Structures are given as C-alpha cells and as structure tokens.
Amino acid sequence: MTQKSLDAEQRAGTGTQRALARLLADVAHLDDVPLDSHFFDELGTDSLVMAHFCARVRKQGDLPDVSMRDVYRHPTIRSLSTVLGGDEPAPAVTAAAPEARPPGPAPPGPEPPPERGSQVLCGALQLLCFVGYAFLLALITARGYDWISTGADLWDDYLRSVVFGAVTLLVLCTLPIVAKWVLIGRWKSRRIPVWSLAYVRFWLVKTLTRANPMALTVGSPLYVLYLRALGARIGRGVTVLSRSVPVCTDLLTVGDRTVIRKDALFGCYRAHDAAIETGTVTLGRDVVVSEATVLDIGTSMGDGAQLGHASSLHPGQHVPDGEHWHGSPGQPTDADFLAVAPARCGAVRRAGHATAQIVMALLVFAPLAVGCLDVLLSKAPRLMTVLEPEPTALADWVFYADLLLVTGVVFFGGVLMALIALAVVPRVLGRLVTPGRVYPLYGVHHAAHRAVTLLTNRRFMTRLFGDSSAVVHYLRWIGYDLSTAEQTGSNFGTAVKHESPLLSSVGRGTMVADG
C-alpha cells in the first residue's frame, strides 16, 4: 500500500470513527467532523451537546458506550475511538513526589458482608449516642435558663447569660476534641470495616467534630486553631474557607500561606469496598485549592501548586512544585487560579479578628438568644399553654387551635422578618465593599462581605423558594440583577449559591447547568 493510500485511509477513519463522527455532526448540527478536531476548542461544542452525543451513542447497538469522562480525557473522534476499541496508549507518567516510594502490595479485597447482628448493634449504639447527646443539651439548656431567670434585675440576667454562654460554649467546643483523643488517639492510615465497633467510634468522632460550634468559625483563624487541636499539622497564614470539616485530622498537612477555598473536600478518608479507608492529604506552602475540589486519600501538592475549580486528585496523584492542574482526575494546565494578588494580613489582624469573634459570641449572641427565649416564655401566655399543656387540655380542641395558631405565627412571622432583613441588611453592608477593589482578610470590609454572604445563602430560604417560579422573585428581592431575565419555569434550583447577590446579574437566554 502506498503512502498516499495510507494517508487517505487515515483521513477516512475506521467504521467506528465514521459512525461517531456522523452522530456528533448530527447532534452538534455540523456539516463535517474531522477525526482529529478537538470537540470543544475547534468544533465549538459544550458539555450539554456532548452529553447528548453520549446518549445517542449508547442507543446504537453496534457502538460501545461513551461516558463524559471519556469525552473530556480524549476530546477527538480518533483518540476516543482508540480508547473504546481497547487500544488506549499507556498514560503519561507525571512527576512523582520526592518522597514517593515504589508501589506496595496490591490493595486488599473487599471486606466480607457484615453480619446482621453487627448492623443492629451499630445502629443501636448510634441511636443511643444521638439520644444521649440531645438529652445532655436539653438538660444543660433547661438548667441554665432556670438559673438565669432567677436574676435580680436586667443587668444580673445579662451577666448570668454571659457566664452561662461562656461555660456552655467551652463545654460544646472541648467535648468533641476530648472525644477524638480519648476514642481514637492519633489517626493512622487503615481500613475500618463498616458497622464494626471501630466504625462506631469513627462515626461518633466525625459527628461530634462537625457539630462543634467551632465549625461555624470556618474562614477565620479560630478554625485553623480548631483543626490544630484535633491533630492537623497546619502552618502559618493558612486560610480554610471550606465548611467540610476534615475527620482524620492527624493525616492532614498544610504548609504556610496555603488557601483552601469553599466547598473543597479533604476529609482524609473515603468509603470503599464496605470499609472506611483513611489516608494522608499533604499540601505544601503557598498552595491554592480552588472551589468544589476533591482531594482523595494519598494525594499531595507541592509548594506553589494550584488545583482548579471543580477538579479532583485521585489516590496517588501528586501535583509537583509550582504546577497548575485541573480536571477530574487532575491534569496539567497553563491556567492561573490565583486571580488576586496577596494582601498583607499579619498576626495582629488575625488575633484581633479571633478575639472579636469570641467577644461577640459571649457578650452579644448568647445573651440575645437567652433574652429572646425569656420574652417568648414570659410575655406570651398562649405560647406557654402550648409548650406546657395541662393533661386535660390534650382532649380539648382549643389546645390544637392554639397550637396551629402559634405554629403559623412563628413560621410565617419568622419568614416575613427574614425577608425584611434580607432586603435591607445586605444592601446596607454592601456599601462598604467596592467591586474590583482588593481588601485584606479579617478587616471591616471583609466582615461586611462575609456577613452578606452568610445572610443571603440561607438553605431554608432557597429550599422554600427554589425549584418554583417564586425563586426568581426571591433572588431579585435579595439583590440579584434579573432585569432582562425571562421567567420560563423554576429557573433556579435549591442549590443556588453566590458570594454577593448585589454583584450577581443574569440576562435573557442564559442557561446554567445543575451544580
């Protein structure tokens, strides 16, 4: 066969390649699909078009199935057909970590199915822990309120509220830390069979550490101190914005000045083959972990490395020093995910912010919560008849009418007050933040921006209005610019999130996929 005929055959492709090209041309409304043209960069398709293409391929009985992962990893017809035909070339070897060791023995097989008795015992212990913790909280709250309500005057009530709040906060914050060190000690890389007693200890520590009030300080220096108290090795100037609290903290190492953005997952464990597998996650200095990323166990990033948005590192992957990766699994890229230059944020500013958080919690939030409870119980007799009914009242329809009335007033009144606050407070605080300007963390401007983010991302409100035609009006109410948007249904689901609604604008004909 001559070289010319070989080139012609290569251009024509195999039968599978021609079939795939015809399907893609039909789905993407293209006249021709060259076999070596990039799906996204050259043919101009997007994820929705390629998802439609995968669905069309699966309907063809004579073609192998295609997944979106295959499309992203092999974005041409020729490379895609090579993979589907089983002739995939060996993957490129990425740079290994300096401390990387030769692969060990093959991983153990799946755990044997747990016995029914183990499942029942595990569930009973979990229920017992839950009921006991709830009872403890109820007992502490009741005793504390009784003590506060016996104060001589308003000032005495306030002082007692501060003392009670401080003691309660100290107990709730230290209990999970003590439980971790008593029940677990130091986390090590291991396999924990599900429904075993070791799994109960894992579950209890995970639940307590994530229910700790310190988890509410995410993004502040207090949160970093909390992770250190749990055993994590975290350097100076680290900022963690993700609300997903890591569980196996002794296996987490984070270098100086590293930034972990919100919605990142780095729990240092995973569920696999009927077992919980724990493993290390190691981040060097000046690392950037972008939003909605997943760091599986056994992953690491070198000094100055970056991982892009909605990306992941699979077990064993390592991002070398200074490299930028993205995708799932992560691959090298030239994109820079550090969009803002560093700003000065010294130890004094961090310490001042942490101190202010503690002072606000003890001197403002705790007394305010107690005061609201006192007003409800002492100034609302009808509410008392519902909370503490007489035995004979349960047979009277008036009791249930009062219950319905109180429930309706509390629910709808609370929603109305929340809507008023969401319409006013973010717009007032938003005046302290100028778009396009860089502010250092833990200052007045950062506090205003963070308050707007926390107030306007309430899950209750998005669940109440999301997935319905009311959500567009709700988003307008809190500050979205939807002046040119056209209501065509729900438009936004219950998972809609933002940094600031005052800086969010959506125009006519815009389509954003789920997630």
Image: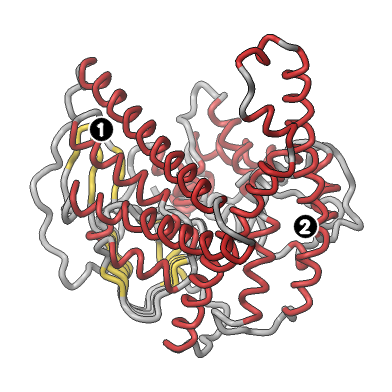
Residue placed most toward the observer, 112 or 374: 374
Estimate the x, y position of residue 242 in percent, counting from the top left. Answer: 47, 60
Amino acid type, label 2: Leu
The residue shown at (47%, 31%) is 65
Residue matched to label 1: 273
Estimate the x, y position of residue 163 in percent, counting from the top left. Answer: 46, 63
| Above or below 484: residue 208 | above
The residue shown at (79%, 77%) is 431
Residue at the top extreme of this rendering: 395
Picture quadrant of residue 317: bottom left
Residue placed most toward the observer, 124 or 149: 149
Q: Is residue 126 left or right of residue 348?
A: left
- Label 2 secondary element: helix
Residue at the left extreme of this rendering: 105
- Label 1 secondary element: loop
Cα distance between the residues tagged 2 and 1: 46 Å
Amino acid type, label 1: Asp
Q: Which mark is residue 485?
A: none
Is residue 296 visible in this depiction of the protein?
A: no
Estimate the x, y position of residue 187 in percent, counting from the top left. Answer: 19, 53
Q: Is residue 108 left or right of residue 512?
A: left
| Above or below 108: residue 401 | above
Picture quadrant of residue 222: bottom left
Estimate the x, y position of residue 392 in percent, counting from the top left. Answer: 65, 12
**Few, some or many C-alpha atoms within 10 Å of disc 1 (few <14, some 14-19, many ≥20)?**
some
Residue matched to label 2: 422
Is residue 179 visible in this depiction of the protein?
A: yes
Q: Is residue 246 left or right of residue 410?
A: left
- Mark 2, mark 1: which one is toward the viewer? 2
The residue shown at (33%, 42%) is 87
User: Going from the N terminus, do you reach mark 2 or mark 1 first?
Assistant: 1
The residue shown at (22%, 69%) is 97
